[in-house]
Amino acid sequence: MAGKLAGKVAIITGSGQGIGRDVALCMAKEGARIVTNNRKPGSSINAFEKTALPFTDQEQQALETVAGDAQTTADEIRRLGGEAVPFFGDAGDFETAKQMVETAVANYGRIDIVVNNASSNWVGNIMDMDEELWDISVVSKLKGTFNLMHHALPHMKEQGFGRILNSSSDAFLGLPGYAAYGAANAGVVALTKAVAADIHGHGITVNAYTPLARTRSWVNAAAAYRLQGMPPEAIEAAAPAAMKRTPEGMVPFLAYLSSDDAADITGHLFKLAADGEIGLWSDPQLVNQITAANGTWTMVELAERVPNELLANAKNLSVALPMS
């Protein structure tokens, strides 16, 4: 298949369904040969690990329309005339990630693009979170991103070409109910910027993005809100515009970032929304500061100056659509 990515080889983790599936299909249409991936054959309708939700018939139907795995995505790519091989395995496991990269090289001779899309999540109050639930979010998202980059970068450096795209989330801002997931995604942002600097000058770019679209996760979240007593119409009204559209229209931006045209774009965090908006997140900036007259603070001085000077224009905590 001819296109902007002709001759390129891409791994897209978590590409059995959702945004990852649409990324895989889009890149295949642009000529890339694809290694599709998810943890195991088959598809779960539960987006939140260790969480069982009683779905309505309408919710169940919506979830079944997005079901799929690495094999079904690879089959669809081949049906459309592209090339793809499925790889089942957890990107959060170091050796499994190595095997995924080796699968790309063994089948297609190279690895040009890695899209770290896979993640797992649990939603709830941190006081109800145990170590396993913490690891579910942090290992799949943050360690999985490290794993694929670690194993793919030597090949990319040798080639003098590489594109790494790391999926983050606006949960990095600190959304209620998403403590572990938010921490993992904040880590992805820092990791992206550090690695972009580490490998600058080798023909490799590293960028991150925060996607927003209607996927399995949104249907699960809406069901959870419903069970908390929130009327369906209120849930729909509170949803961002991008959550009302499926992701296929926004993923060409990721194909663009993977192309030769984007050779100078690296170290950025983008907002990517299914309603057509693409944004660039700012880097954190120091917005205010106070200084002790002689370099030493007293408790009396702090009690006066912190609220009246340092935090004078600070915004209060705001909470939207809490999960618990």
Image (tube, grey):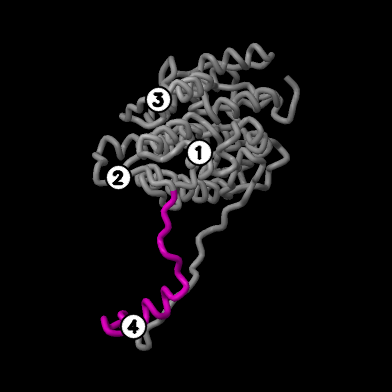
Q: Which residue is mark 3?
A: 55
The amino acid pointed to by label 2 is: Asn
Query: Hey, which residue is sitting farthest right in the picture?
Result: 2
Q: Earlier in the sequence, mark 3 or mark 2?
A: 3
Residue 139 in view in this figure:
no
Q: Which residue is mark 2?
A: 125
Q: Which residue is mark 1?
A: 233
Quarter that holds the C terminus: top left
* Residue 283, quarter of picture: bottom right
CA separation in Å, label 4 and label 3: 53 Å
Camera-nearest label, 4 or 3: 3
Q: Which residue is mark 4?
A: 304
In front: 80, or 64? Answer: 64
In front: 21, or 86? Answer: 21
Q: Position of residue 266 (x, y in %)?
A: 61, 47
Going 55% across and 40% down the picture, which residue do you hit?
A: 211
Q: Does 313 appear in magenta?
A: yes
The amino acid pointed to by label 1 is: Glu
How crowded pointer 4 is (Cα within 10 Å; few <14, some 14-19, many 20+) is rated as: few
User: For the magenta stretch, what is the residue range?
Assistant: 295-320
Is disc 2 placed on a helix, strand or loop?
loop
Q: Position of residue 199 (x, y in %)?
A: 55, 46
Going 57% across and 53% down the picture, which residue do you hit?
A: 281
Q: Position of residue 291 (x, y in %)?
A: 40, 81
The amino acid pointed to by label 3 is: Phe
* Residue 315, quarter of picture: bottom left
